[in-house]
Amino acid sequence: MTADAPVNVEESVNVIVVGGGAAGLAAAVAAEEAGLSCQLLEAQSRLGGRVRTVPLKSGGLFDEGAQMLNGDMRGLLALAGRAHLHLSPIPQTGIDLCIAGEETLRCEDLISADEVCDLLEDHVVRWDSLGEALRALRLKLQWMTTPWESIGEAGRAAKLLVQKREAPRDSLACALRALLLCEEDNALAYSLFTELFGGAPEDINAQGVRDILSRYGSEREDLEFQISGGMSRIIDGLRADLRHKPRLNTPVQRIRVTADRVEVTSGANLWSAEYVVVAVPPPTARRIVFDLDGSDELDGLLSSFTAGDMIKTLLVFDSAFWRLKGLSGHATFCDPAGLVIADASLDDGLPPRLVAFQGGPLARDWAVLPQSERQAHLLRHLRRAFGEDLPDPREIAEAVWVDHPWSGGGYNATVRVGANPDAVAQLAAWGGRVRFAGAELDDHFWGYVEGAIHSGRSAIARIARA
Ligand SMILES: Cc1cc2nc3c(=O)[nH]c(=O)nc-3n(C[C@H](O)[C@H](O)[C@H](O)COP(=O)(O)OP(=O)(O)OC[C@H]3O[C@@H](n4cnc5c(N)ncnc54)[C@H](O)[C@@H]3O)c2cc1C
């Protein structure tokens, strides 16, 4: 036995769940409900992962991670209903803004995120050859209703054909260009995807995005409600359902499949079980040593993902000044790409608030700045959107998810360029004694807490069937 070999052999169970985020907790509860003994192991000193609610100095709460849900997220709604949690509707009235350079545009005059997603789902074109480019152009021309539009589009397409291709061929940036959107629409779509995936569209796999978009199980907007009391109340509810105490501060380092069991190691402790559910984001799971048949293939799948970069900032104001100007509080910035502001006020009488999401390269750039500088930059951009008379916020709170040691980042990890575009489906379907779960693997609500819960429960349902 080597000096660092485990010395404490822990109790043997039917299922070990690695990771105590929404997916891991839902899996552990489902395992116990199915009559299986289960031990949950969590690396951090708390449960919840990318769900974390903290108090604000000025009163009220800040959801540093997940915050919002919609009316089709049945798993979350059931948990919220059972705990008698109040769902506060996200304010939706007023004009949404798009900030491009010195210009402030109305989002209603530009392409919507839904339209871009529909176009992408239909036409993720591999921009491999002139032939493909011309095919995309022909398709585009077919959609045009007037000859003038056609001439404009043809001009843009011709420019595109001679343009130096900087983005990799399988990237989302390339796919967006192939849609031949007008300049403003393209800049808006580029910024929205940078925020949504926490990465530059040049680094994100277009086919992977197409797959992800097909994994959103709703016709409704994703941001309809937030939970008064915070999303952590959902985690508290799941934890309360768990009979066997989770082990905190227990980072799993190694998972080894033997002839008839699977062994899990954390420090000097060793657990054995019939099955393991790894409910850890793929980039973080890659740090675990997997000793099993197909470990090279598994490493290939896990390394197909790139963690998102995200900073989330909450700004509490004395009044909802944006509403007085007829604005919704929602603003998307084309420059810097990846900056999106939304109204996150609750209906509980507490002071109104805006939330700012800074995703992708912007988050990475700002993460290294002193907090005061980061916030000064953000306020400068808010003034661009809402006017120089922007009142001073009563409080600013922020959560930096860039390179988070246990989540990898935020909101979620996506498939990177040059990687296997089917990595999500293949990892979710991984069989044998080690299974994978998590928001990034769900076929129902990919990338949401709802998806994490659904994925954790599905992993246990597959084990119970086996
Ligand atoms: C800023 C931000 C805003 C978001 N907003 C929303 C929103 O409004 N609505 C929404 O639905 N979703 C939102 N999301 C996404 C949502 O939070 C995640 O998709 C979801 O919480 C992921 O759950 P999970 O259980 O799959 O992973 P995680 O929550 O990341 O849980 C994984 C757990 O595994 C643990 N772990 C990691 N490595 C190990 C190891 N080796 N051993 C043991 N444990 C380990 C981690 O500590 C963590 O607790 C947001 C995310 C962020 C970051």
Image: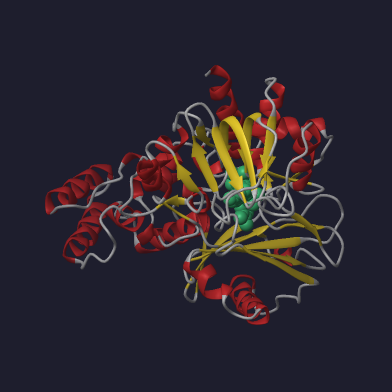
Task: Give the percent coordinates (x, y) of residue 94.
Answer: 65, 55
Nearest the viewer among 459 and 198 is 459
User: Which residue appears farthest toward the front when viewing the image?
Assistant: 1
Residue at 67 percent across and 20 percent down: it is 34
Nearest the viewer among 169 and 144 is 169
Q: Is residue 69 visible?
A: no
Residue at 75 percent across and 33 percent down: it is 79
93 vs 211, left or right, is right
Task: Give the percent coordinates (x, y) of residue 8.
Answer: 68, 44
Residue at 51 percent across and 58 percent down: it is 308
Q: Is residue 233 above or below residue 361?
A: above
Task: Give the percent coordinates (x, y) of residue 14.
Answer: 63, 27
Q: Is residue 392 above or below residue 239?
A: below
Residue at 42 percent across and 45 percent down: it is 117
Nearest the viewer among 266 and 93 is 266
Residue 210 image-quadrant placement:
top left
Nearest the viewer among 342 and 171 is 171
Give the color scheme: rainbow, by chain, secondary structure or one colour: secondary structure
174 vs 404, left or right, is left
Q: Is residue 198 above or below residue 389?
A: above
31 vs 158, left or right, is right
User: Which residue appears farthest toward the top when viewing the image?
Assistant: 465
Residue 69 image-quadrant placement:
top right
